[in-house]
Image: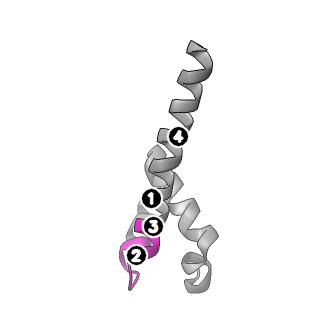
Amino acid sequence: MSESKSNSLWGVFKSVAASMFGVQSHQNYEHDFQQKSFVPYLLVGIVFVIGLILGLVIIVNIALG
């Protein structure tokens, strides 16, 4: 993975999504930990968790409604 591609928002998004679903390759995992800042990964991870919670709440409300 190239340096500029992994630091893009889309690259961080793909990396976090792959990690959350457990399909991240070991090579990409190692590359992510070599980055200078973890902040983009943290922010995208928080957005993913909030999105998951909101999605589950919506699904439950639809099912019970």
Q: Is residue 36 left or right of residue 4?
A: left
Q: Are marks 1 and 3 in contact (CB under 8 Å)?
A: yes
Q: Which residues are magenta?
A: 31-42
The residue type indicated by label 1 comes to: Gly
The amino acid beneath tag 4 is Leu
Mark 4–mark 3 distance (CA, rounded to whole Å): 17 Å
Give me the disc on residue 43.
3
Q: Which residue is mark 4?
A: 54
Element marked by disc 1: helix
Earlier residue among tags 4 and 3: 3
Q: Quadrant of the C terminus?
A: top right
Residue position marked by numbered label 2 in the rendering? 39
Q: Name the image quarter holding residue 12.
A: bottom right
Amino acid marked by disc 2: Val
Q: Secondary structure at mark 2?
A: helix
Assess whether residue 37 is covered by the magenta stretch.
yes
Q: Secondary structure at mark 4?
A: helix
Point out the tag, 4 or 2, that comes first from the N-terminus. 2
* Discs 2, 1 touching: Cβ within 8 Å: no
Gap in Å between the C-alphas at discs 4 and 1?
14 Å
Residue at (38, 86) in percent of width and height: 36
Q: Is residue 1 above or below residue 26?
A: below
Q: Is 30 within the magenta?
A: no
Residue, disc 1: 45
Number of marks in picture: 4
- Three-letter amino acid code at disc 3? Leu
Q: Give the residue at x 58% y 60%.
A: 14
Is disc 2 in contact with disc 3, using a CB cutoff of under 8 Å? Answer: yes
Query: Going by the image, does 9 lie left or right of 32?
Result: right
Q: Mark 1 or mark 4, which is nearer the start of the sequence?
A: 1
